[in-house]
Image (spheres, grey):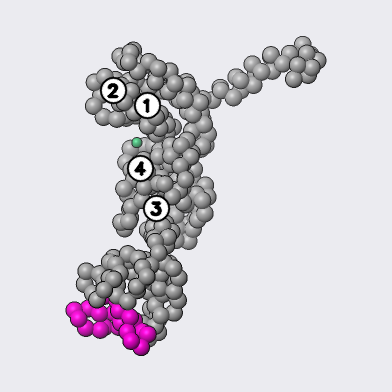
Amino acid sequence: MNGIGTGFAWRGLSWGHVLVALLLGCTGQAGTVRMDASDAPDAKAWSESATQLAREWYPRLGNLLSSSDLVRLPDVTIRLSTTYAGVAAASGTTIEMSAKRVVELPDDSRGVVIHELVHVVQAYPGGSEGWLTEGIADYLRCAVYEALPLEQFPRSDKEQGYRDSYKVAAGFLLWLESGPAPGIVRQVNAALRKGTYRESVFKERTGRELDTLWNEYRAVFARATPLPSVTRLWRHAKGSFELQSDGTWGEFEGGKKIWTFQEVGRSSSQIELLDKSRNLRLRLLAREVRLGNSNGWSVLYRGEWVANE
Ligand SMILES: [Zn+2]
């Protein structure tokens, strides 16, 4: 590098001049990060490392969530407060954090800084979809900054479980980004910022409704649960599915057989059943029965296998 550096001189410019110009060009669009730890002398070491982290990541987060509306990131202040009772909160361009907590949980608190910086970058108008606001903040914190693999995100097994927001929604967004809808975070972010977000964006991108996508995401992990060694009786709150001596499966309710299914497929984690007369397909899994429909598979019952009758 030395040989190139000393040899370079073009119309009076040196490498030093070029470097200064490049630095100005790269940082000219990003806002500054200021740390106010004057209230919290105990947190001095943490505040110094967090300032460095925030200065590195703030422009990155800005780039990851860039849209034509956001030309320049605003300057942001992180204030460590000894009186603030919560974990942290971003309000406009000020982030308030508990000084006590950053000392007790220094690593987690660095993740919190990333999460709150995302809120400053988002700058969504009021009344935005809360699960997406928090889900995107935790998506950038956990999937991008902490590099957490998909299987380690907390999950919800509820219908519309993405509404649990935060890390549950973040895992769902990572799954969407990883296959069904690459780029969806940036797209949804731009729409939220503009105030034009509609849930229909998921259908437009993937051909499936948001709730159907959620059920698919749940199914990815349910698939991994193997069936027990004895699979004769599967029971839910109001009835059961039972293997009959002729090899068919009966669906029982109130002690009466109401439908008969043929077993048409079996893997280590599910048994597929068909009722030809109604053209109806079911899957018996470890803890749920799913119903096949034009949109994929939805949960019909929750229950479990019973080892002995
Ligand atoms: Zn938040």
For disc 1, the neighbor class at 10 Å (few under 14, some 14 to 19, many from 20) is some
Residue of label 2: 100
The disc, 2 or 4, on the residue closer to the chain's N-terminal end is: 2
Query: Which residue is at a point 32% across and 64% down the rendered structure image?
Result: 287
Residue of label 3: 199
Question: Could you tell me if the residues under marks 1 and 3 are in contact, i.e. CB atoms within 8 Å?
Answer: no
The disc, 2 or 1, on the residue closer to the chain's N-terminal end is: 2
How far is mark 2 from mark 4, CA to CA? 23 Å
Query: Which residue is at a point 39% across and 53% down the rendered structure image?
Result: 199
Q: Position of residue 289 (x, y in %)?
A: 33, 69
Q: Nearer the viewer, residue 239 or 247?
A: 247
- Residue 252 part of the magenta segment: yes
Question: Could you tell me if the residues under marks 3 and 2 are in contact, i.e. CB atoms within 8 Å?
Answer: no
At mark 1, the secondary structure is helix
Residue type at numbered disc 1:
Pro
Residue of label 4: 166
Which residues, given as a range, are shown in magenta? 240-259
User: In the image, is 153 to the left or to the right of 61?
Assistant: left
Q: Main secondary structure of the magenta part?
A: strand
For disc 3, the neighbor class at 10 Å (few under 14, some 14 to 19, many from 20) is few
The disc, 1 or 3, on the residue closer to the chain's N-terminal end is: 1
For disc 4, the neighbor class at 10 Å (few under 14, some 14 to 19, many from 20) is many
Question: Could you tell me if the residues under marks 2 and 1 are in contact, i.e. CB atoms within 8 Å?
Answer: no
How far is mark 2 from mark 1, CA to CA? 10 Å
- Label 3 residue near ligand 1, CB within 8 Å: no
User: In the image, is 122 to the left or to the right of 164?
Assistant: right
Q: Foreground mark, 3 or 4?
A: 4
How far is mark 3 from mark 4, CA to CA? 18 Å
Q: Foreground mark, 4 or 1?
A: 1
Which residue extends farthest left? Answer: 254
